[in-house]
Image: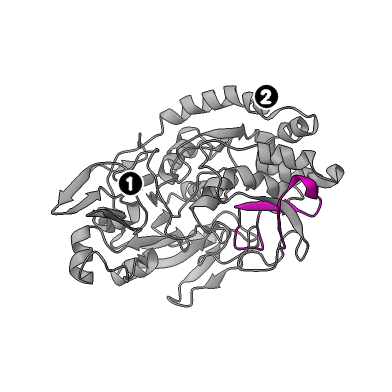
Amino acid sequence: MIFIRNAFKNTFLFFCTLLIFHGSVTKTFAQGQNVRQLNAITKDSVQITAPIIVGANQTELYLPILEGKKVAIVGNQTSVIFRYPNLNMLIEEQGGIESTEFKQYTHLVDSLLSRNIKIQKVFAPEHGFRGKADAGELVANSKDIKTGLPIFSLHGKDKKPSVASLSGIDIVVFDIQDVGVRFYTYISTLHYVMQACAENNIPVLILDRPNPNAHYIDGPTLEPKHSSFLGVHPIPLVHGMTIGEYAKMINGEGWLGKDLTCEITIIPLKNYTHKSSYNLPIRPSPNLPNDKAINLYPSLGFFEGTTINAGRGTEKQFQIFGSPDLAIEHYNFAYIPKPNFGAKYPKHRGEVCYGNDLRKTKWLSSINLWWLVNAYKNSNDKDKFFNTKSFTLHAGTEKLQQQIQDGISVQEIKKSWSEDLKAYKIKRQQYLLYK
């Protein structure tokens, strides 16, 4: 086994998902997710594809690193260890492949505590440790009810761990499921955790997880003058990297500043490529409830900086969009946003929104700008359509809003991204852990 530490050494890991074919009937066990590729193993009449194994599951590789150390965890509800590493264990414990009633995972914190790892505290990203806070909602420091561990929020007044909060810590473990989009703030949290740890000479152990949007790279590249928590680095909107790969890029590009380099150990994925199909077993945030929402999120996320509601306040978050200002004659779908889990105050609460239902659209392998451009064209209040500050922070540039207002075609807008995307793909290549 090879580890990736600073100079980026290699390793293999553990995660589980079973694609099971039995006779003429296909059954899927989403133990973390389906992997529709890789080596097929046949045992009797059961055929299994090699499962993607996440970093957290390969405890034998990182428990020796943590033993005897005072540990801090950067995690949330997605920081789990999946319970069934292979089909035999599932069959033996559950009495056959027909059984689907089983506990799928244990939380990383609970598992490590049961192994006598000395966890001292938890750092929580946007949405909190249990993943229940609204998007953008400030989260206060607290205590975990189950374990009694202190929780330090990294989405409140502090986005970066303080010197005091890191006091007495020997190593920080980072384990969060990302979705591969620049304005999805978990990679910003990764940046600030690495920066704080570099400043305090604390190593970081990264348990890698698949990027469900790693099959393409697209979107405008962030201009440094528009850097914010919605985008810290000059990368395209859809960056095509896992958390582990992205950590390598942060170090390699010198983005921590002051000649800082964070000491990192990455536990890589096993049986994974950037083309792997991966379905998330746990919603990574309150308003990304399923795979369709995650796939549409890079395209519909632009609406966060406009008057358009992208499904918040419904059960179809990031699968529909609409607004009372959209011309009804151009849209055949309507809904009314109401407060719910993850959206206490949704945009256009209680108002009828006219728009599109995208749940049956084809799977995207590039950003769809047509929905945004068309919504602007068909808005009855173009002067208020853009919240310029918010839209610029999401896009990472002022150019996109100007291009849309000037009537530039989708094809021409996307063409204007091409040179930056080419340069990024060349830069990205040196940091990849997976094909």
Residue 186 visible, this orientation: no
- 56 or 323: nearer the viewer: 323
* Side (left or right) of 325 relative to 304: right
Q: Position of residue 282 (x, y in %)?
A: 45, 60
The N terminus lies in which quarter of the figure? top left
The C terminus lies in which quarter of the figure? top left
Tag nearer the camera, 1 or 2 = 2
- 334 or 190: nearer the viewer: 334
The secondary structure that most of the magenta stretch takes on is loop
Q: Position of residue 271 (x, y in %)?
A: 29, 44
Q: Which residue of the protein is positioned furthest toward the top in this rendering? A: 419
Looking at the rendering, which quadrant does residue 434 occupy? Answer: top left
Q: Which residue is mark 1?
A: 269
Looking at the image, residue 291 lies above or below residue 236: below
- What's the residue at 48%, 27% (across, down)? 425
Q: Which residue is mark 2?
A: 412
Q: Callout 1: helix, strand or loop?
A: loop
Q: Over which residues does the magenta segment extend?
A: 311-336
